Image (spheres, rainbow, N blue to C red):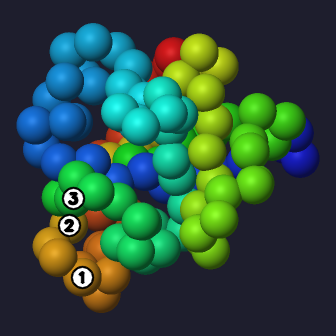
């Protein structure tokens, strides 16, 4: 559907366990927003916490493209979004496996 975008958010294993327990992604400490990238590989250049990449569906109208860093968008954690898939990764973009190896999540926030 053209009203939705797929974006990717990288977090640590500890962060992912917190998301699964709480049922939502915690916003950034600096501004309360959730930061994401258009591809899994681009999350490596902007994520502070690394190890797990989440595939997220969010309404395009919720995305803020005014971020100063390339390959980065943000949205409010108070908006509706779905966590579709997750995958554990290494320290570099080439560690992102093919999408068939991702785990389906279906967490609706």
Q: Quadrant of residue 96?
A: bottom left
User: Which mark lies nearer to you, 3 or 2?
Assistant: 3
- For the residue carrying disc 2, how many other residues have a C-alpha within 10 Å: few (<14), some (14-19), or many (20+)? some
- Nearer to us in this view, 7 or 26: 26
Answer with mark 1 or mark 3, whichever residue precedes in sequence.
3
Give the image location of residue 48, x and y in percent: 28, 57
Give the image location of residue 63, x and y in percent: 74, 42
Distance between the Cα atoms at labels 1 and 3? Answer: 10 Å
Q: Secondary structure at mark 3?
A: loop
**Residue corresponding to mark 1:** 92
**Please, is residue 36 above or below residue 75 in the view?**
below
Tell me whether circle 3 and circle 2 mark residues in contact (CB < 8 Å): yes
**Residue corresponding to mark 3:** 50
Distance between the Cα atoms at labels 3 and 2? Answer: 8 Å
The reply to whether residue 4 is visible in this rendering is no
For image coordinates 35% across by 33% down, the residue present is: 29
């Amino acid at each position: 559907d053209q009203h939705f975008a797929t974006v990717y958010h990288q977090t640590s294993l500890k962060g992912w366990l917190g998301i699964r327990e709480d049922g939502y992604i915690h916003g950034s400490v600096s501004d309360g927003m959730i930061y994401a990238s258009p591809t899994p590989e681009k999350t490596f250049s902007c994520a502070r916490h690394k190890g797990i990449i989440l595939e997220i569906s969010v309404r395009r109208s919720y995305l803020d493209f005014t971020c100063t860093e390339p390959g980065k968008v943000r949205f409010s954690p108070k908006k509706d979004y779905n966590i579709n898939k997750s995958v554990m990764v290494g320290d570099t973009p080439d560690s992102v496996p093919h999408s068939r190896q991702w785990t389906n999540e279906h967490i609706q926030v």
